[in-house]
Amino acid sequence: MKGKSSKESFTIMNELVLPNDTNTLNNLMGGRLLHWMDIAAAISAQKHCNRIVVTASVDNVSFQHPIKLGDVITIEAKVSRAFTTSVEVRLDVYAQNIPSGTKVKSNEAYYTFVALDQNGRTIPVPPMLPETDEEVELYEGALRRRQLRLILGGKMKPDDATELKALFFGVTK
């Protein structure tokens, strides 16, 4: 299977924060942002896989800056690594207040998607071929993030997480 570059999956999605998207403090509701992020990440994953994908996991999403009513949200998504039947997608979220001209990074997250065939069974995905230093760094970190997700999801024993152990203890065994 032919590999793909991260730029082939790059997706930009914009949304305007309207009153129905906000809480009583006129800040964007977190659930609404997670919904938009899921859409952008799914588009990115589908571009990479050329398949229908389903969300398998969402990593920690922390708000670094409140997003206000009237802000324009820009979500950038790209595949950071492909595994056998899944891909990890990196998202960066920016909030822009157009009248003031300010733009701040609000969030970042990693979503994992699994590719499915017509019958709903998992199917192999193309490898991701990192090209830039940033892509190599995200690619290399993806295995540690994956192992942590698997441990937290009860699908891997901590003793089997060789990449995480190497990170914390310098053990490569």
Image (cartoon, rainbow, N blue to C red):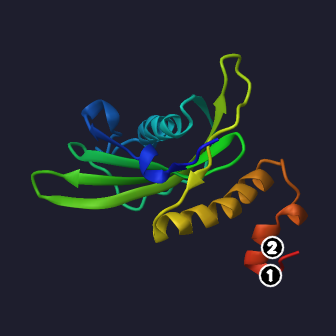
Q: Position of residue 159 (x, y in %)?
A: 90, 65
- Residue placed at 71% from the left, 31% from the top? 123
* Disc 2: which residue: 165
Q: Residues within 10 Å of mark 1 (few under 14, many from 20)?
A: few
Q: Residues within 10 Å of mark 2 (few under 14, many from 20)?
A: some
C-beta proximity under 8 Å, tags 1 and 2: yes
Quadrant (top left/top right/bottom left/bottom right) for the C terminus: bottom right
Total numbered labels placed on residues in the image: 2
Q: Position of residue 38 (x, y in %)?
A: 49, 38
* Disc 1: which residue: 169
Residue furthest to the front in view is 2
User: Could you say which quadrant of the image residue 165 lies in?
Assistant: bottom right
User: Could you say which quadrant of the image residue 92 lies in?
Assistant: bottom left
Residue furthest to the bottom in view is 170
Q: Position of residue 147 (x, y in %)?
A: 75, 58
Name which residue type carries label 2.
Lys
Q: Position of residue 82 (x, y in %)?
A: 63, 49
Taking 116 as reference, is 57 above or below it? Answer: below
Near-viewer residue (11 or 129): 129
Q: Is residue 163 shown left or right of residue 31?
A: right
Near-viewer residue (24 or 30): 30
Name which residue type carries label 1.
Phe
- Residue placed at 13% from the left, 58% from the top? 101
